[in-house]
Amino acid sequence: MISWPSPINPWDSRWILHTVLDLRHSRHYTSAESLRLNRKAAQGLGIGIMTSEQNIIDRSYMRRALELAVSARGRTSPNPMVGAVLVKDGRVVGEGFHAFAGSDHAECVAVRDAQGQARGATLYVNLEPCCHYGKTPPCVELIIGAGVSRVVAACQDPNPAVNGKGIEALQAAGIGVEVGCLADEAARLNEAFFTHMQLGRPFVLMKVASSLDGKIATRTGESRWITGESARQHVHRLRNMVDGVLVGIGTILRDDPMLTTRLGIEDQRDPARIIVDNLARLPLRAKVINRASTAPTYIAVSAMAPPARLEALEREQVQIIRVEDSPRRVSLARLLQTLAKMGLLSVMIEGGAEIYASALKEGVVDKVLMFLAPILVGGKSSASAVAGEGIDTFSQAVRLADVRIERFDSDILVEGYIRGQQQAP
Ligand SMILES: NC(=O)c1ccc[n+]([C@@H]2O[C@H](COP(=O)([O-])OP(=O)(O)OC[C@H]3O[C@@H](n4cnc5c(N)ncnc54)[C@H](OP(=O)(O)O)[C@@H]3O)[C@@H](O)[C@H]2O)c1
């Protein structure tokens, strides 16, 4: 059975389409309308239990806040995606979202959009409002000052500077606060931000293109192209959303990829390119060193990397990441911690087989995206998707959860989450 993308999948490009349509057509629902729409949606989904009309109304406006939030996907790092909706007398009076790091927070945009009508309104926001001075002043002060009477937040902010304190400050000002409306969807939407906050590393996607028999290259090392145009376009959409793409030096030496976003749209942007390269073997003319790109190229090296090579690469604008505690071989876990400190919330690993194996072994993969092309390659010496030592029993296999399947012409994308610690592949 093919399951279509759920609207809470933050990596699904259809979110954007959905959002654009909604922005155009659904700005002012009355509460009766939203109630009707939600009942219909609930029936369609087979959801029978709704605790109260208010609950249904709250979910409707929270969904709108989530839609607004996701319209800035891939642009807010190191901040989360946040959307806010102000509702008064059953009518939306203000909306907003956080567009990019350093810009106004969603609550602020919504209050401004309400043009003085926020007094007595309910604020729907997918993350607890902040209470600290960052690049912008605390949102709670603005919310209190604007006279908002009720705040419905989807979830608490995991940022220790906020984490419950925003809610307390609102309550102390006499504002009714409810937390938990569409909490799962909100957490999924900001899974990269939550991972960054809670684990101190970016959310890691492992993207593989393989034949049906699990091969990522032929016996001569050819790997282009395994999948068709439509699947490859989706990879460009993913690159447009993630903060970084990471590959091993083996892939660079074999394929010389550019690792840029090539969607042909105006507001596309490249992710940072990170090459894991113990000895700094990256050729000075590699395509991944792209001065025209909007994003930097990094190489992550071990303590063994020859200084002369590093200097030569630096002259080509390559930025060096010396990975701590990596005397001979780069520790991916350590590298990811460094990338998190540099503000990257999400990284997509794009190969090759050895890097996939190391990432799984080090337990740093959160989500696998496996594009399967309907071809059989065969050959004992053709690379399989994941190298490493392998396992003895299937009980040791890395198992995916929340599996979803999507088709791209004749290719199939199987994606799923890895929960907890992975086993060695
Ligand atoms: N179909 C696909 O989706 C896909 C995607 C990418 C690549 N590929 C194919 O995969 C092949 C390349 O894969 P590969 O396995 O040979 O190379 P790779 O995984 O791209 O790179 C492996 C190399 O990275 C360096 N490295 C540094 N730290 C490492 C660590 N912690 N773990 C693992 N490696 C580390 C090592 O070289 P040093 O010791 O020299 O640093 C190692 O030999 C090519 O044929 C390519 O076409 C296919």
Image (cartoon, rainbow, N blue to C red):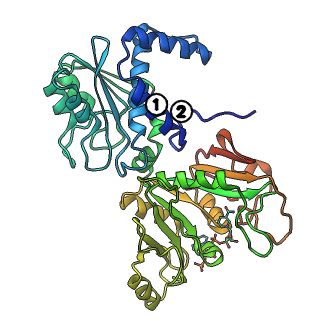
> Measuring 25% from the left and 50% from the top, which residue is drawn there?
102
Q: Would you place residue 306 above or below residue 325 in this image?
A: below
Q: Quadrant of the N terminus?
A: top right
Callout 2: SS: loop
Mark 1 is surrounded, within 10 Å at the Cα level, by few (under 14), some (14 to 19) or many (20 or more) other residues, namely few
| Contact flag, marks 1 and 2 (Cβ < 8 Å) | no
Mark 2 is surrounded, within 10 Å at the Cα level, by few (under 14), some (14 to 19) or many (20 or more) other residues, namely some
Q: Would you place residue 333 above or below residue 119 in this image?
A: below
Residue 223: percent from the left, percent from the top?
71, 67
Q: Would you place residue 208 above or below residue 51 in this image?
A: below
Q: Would you place residue 162 above or below residue 357 in this image?
A: above
Question: Which residue is labeled 1 in the image?
Answer: 21
- Camera-nearest residue between 240 and 385: 240
Residue 329: percent from the left, percent from the top?
55, 75
Residue 12: percent from the left, percent from the top?
55, 42
Closer to the N terminus: mark 1 or mark 2?
2
> Measuring 37% from the left and 11% from the top, which residue is drawn there?
31
- Between marks 1 and 2, how big is the CA–CA gap? 13 Å
**Is residue 180 in sight in this rendering?**
no
Question: Which residue is labeled 2 in the image?
Answer: 7
**Residue type highlighted by circle 2:** Pro
Q: Quadrant of the C terminus?
A: bottom right
Callout 1: SS: helix
> Measuring 39% from the left and 78% from the top, which residue is drawn there?
317
Residue 392: percent from the left, percent from the top?
80, 57
In the visual, does 178 lie left or right of 214? left
| Marking on residue 104 | none
Camera-near label (1 vs 2) is 1
Ligand 1 is found in the corner quadrant, namely bottom right
**Residue type highlighted by circle 1:** Leu
> Measuring 44% from the left and 34% from the top, which residue is drawn there?
20
**Is residue 116 in sight in this rendering?**
yes
